[in-house]
Image: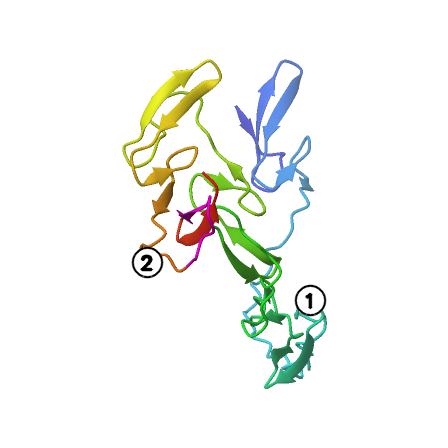
Amino acid sequence: NNYSFSYNGGSCIATTNAYICQCTYPYTGSNCETAIATRAPQPMCPCILCPCPTPAPVETNPCLPNPCQNNGGCSAAQNIPQCHCQPAYSGYYCEYRRKRSLGISYCANVTCLNGGKCFDDERGPRCGCPQPYFGERCEFINRPRTCNPNPCNADGQCISTRDGYKCLCKNGRTGILCEQMVVAKNYRWCPLDCQSGTTCVYEGTSPKCLAL
């Protein structure tokens, strides 16, 4: 049976020598006499846009730190860096080294061998060597060790030897690899007047008098 001695809408059921009350929310206790503490719903805060003050523009110096390389000077034009390069350098940021002035020849005292040609760059005078020569002055020759493939130029015949090979050159050619062209003394394209015992030989495109 339900009994009415409970509070706040609860109902009680009798048991042996006792009773049990079932309480409605938000009440509790043996007779539903105690309210459970609850937080009242809070109203939602409306969205508010707060205008922020615009900061004053900050003046920056495009030359700090200096973007110009290789000791180049910097000046600012409309907040853009302008580099003033040392004479040996060029480029927007002076990042490139100029080649040596073509008006000054550093090859006057340099002799390139075996048909090599001297030219100037930022490292100084250098020899450009025709194949198969190499070295600072084209003084070395890159020699294969075998006759296969045939290393001899101008259809020269390659003969294997104990030390490697030997080139037998056809008429008009000489050199270790038959790379030199022999020119007769009276040949009109040889500008040299070779002495007795020497022959005009072209090493690449350079004529020389050599004793063969």
Say which residue appears at 46% left-offset and 30% top-offset: 143
Magenta span: helix, strand or loop, mainly?
loop
Extent of the magenta region: 192-202
Measured as percent of width and height from the top left, residue 110 is found at 60, 57
Residue extending furthest toward the front: 196
**Residue 108: quarter of image:** bottom right
Badge nearest the viewer, 2 or 1:
2
The residue pinned by badge 1 equals 70
Q: Nearer the viewer, residue 60 or 12?
A: 60
Q: Residue at x 33, y 32 (%)?
A: 169
Q: In the picture, residue 65 is in which quadrant? A: bottom right
Query: What's the residue type where badge 1 is placed?
Result: Asn
Tag shown at residue 180: none
Q: Residue furthest left?
A: 155
Residue picked out by circle 2: 189
In the image, residue 154 sits, relative to residue 20, either above or below, namely below
Relative to 30, residue 98 above or below: below
